[in-house]
Image (cartoon, rainbow, N blue to C red):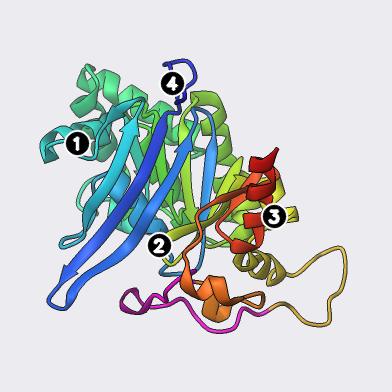
Amino acid sequence: MSAPATRANRPLLDVRNLHVEFPTRRGRLVAVDDVSFHIDAGEVLGVVGESGAGKSLTGAAIIGLLEPPGRIAGGEVLLDGKRIDNLPAEQLRRIRGRQIGAVFQDPLTSLDPLFTVGQQLTETITTHLDLSESEARNRAIELLREVGIPGAERRIDHYPHQFSGGMRQRVVIALALCAQPRLIIADEPTTALDVSIQAQIITLLKRLCRDHGAAVMLVTHDMGVIAETADRVAVMYAGRIAEIGPVADVIQRPRHPYTVGLMGSIPKLDRAVPRLVQIEGSMPRLNAIPTGCAFNPRCPKVFERCRIERPELFPVGGSAAACWLHATTLAEAARG
């Protein structure tokens, strides 16, 4: 048995065997199935996969924003060593505002059109920090400057519709940082933005992570964003982690056939390829996830065991992959 983690070496976020399910009249649908990972302070973990892989649901479960009837059916979520998934709604709401910040894909859903951005920022600040209205307003201006809003002293009194899409996303990031959170969940924060604005938001997230020492969970379907931003990456498929490891290892030496397909579908700038890799088929529906490895109907390297037994994550180099191709590596390591 390993020694318990001390405060100095334990991760800021520790997700253990997380299960998320949706009860229906025909039974329960498992959307997130036994997912485990951690994020250290100052680290960016990218979570990538096709639509329906369970990325956003994992983030929503961590911060207690699952839409009913979705629910956490098993596992634990620990923030700085303290379990938060079983807290009463009001207590979790206070933690979500104070210790966890969230950045979502569409900034218009995060900002109230009837109030100025300054009113929304100062209300959030005074709710979670012991500051006066004037002190909160000054902090709001500082945050707007920090996220790159020009003329922050003037723009603080503008309404959300007076900002461009990229500037609105910057305001949302400022809103997420109001109470100096230790964890930031960023769910597709660059999807609705053009490429140049995407690059600015990526740079901003990396700088905030470095300067504030926050842990960041970056949910996206864009491997380019992951390559530019993340320290480690978790590749999800059908509600499970298919591969996880340092971003350079996963991108340059993918171990799971699904990750190989994802990387092969990205054009290369340094060489011409006659045809990009295409992953045949599509993500299975929640009520039709196949037995064994969920990827087996689409996998070019499938063999009989894949159709019968579900693989766990096997360590491969500096990464881990849930693929029976690497079971021999584990067996060899066990033999010494």
Q: Is residue 90 above or below residue 55?
A: above
The location of residue 148, given as percent across then percent down, is: 52, 38
Q: Which residue is mark 2?
A: 239
**SS category of the residue bearing label 3:** helix
Q: Is residue 39 above or below residue 21?
A: above
> Which amino acid does the dot numbered 4 rest on?
Ala
Query: Magenta segment: does it hold 36?
Result: no
Earlier-in-chain disc, 3 versus 1: 1
Earlier-in-chain disc, 2 versus 4: 4
**SS category of the residue bearing label 2:** loop
Q: Is residue 88 above or below residue 322?
A: above
Q: Mark 1, mark 4: which one is toward the viewer? A: 4
Q: Answer yes or no: do the residues labelled 3 and 1 have beta carbons within 8 Å?
A: no
Residue at x 42%, y 28% (from the top left corner): 12
Q: Answer yes or no: do the residues labelled 1 and 4 have beta carbons within 8 Å?
A: no
Give the side of residue 61 with respect to residue 260, left or right: left
Q: Which residue is mark 1?
A: 92
- Along the viewing direction, whichever of 128 and 167 lies nearer the viewer: 128
The location of residue 310, given as percent across then percent down, is: 47, 64
Distance between mark 1 and mark 2 Cα atoms: 24 Å
Q: Mark 3, mark 1: which one is toward the viewer? A: 3
Q: Tell me which segment is drawn in magenta.
A: 278-294
Earlier-in-chain disc, 4 versus 3: 4
Q: Which residue is mark 3?
A: 251
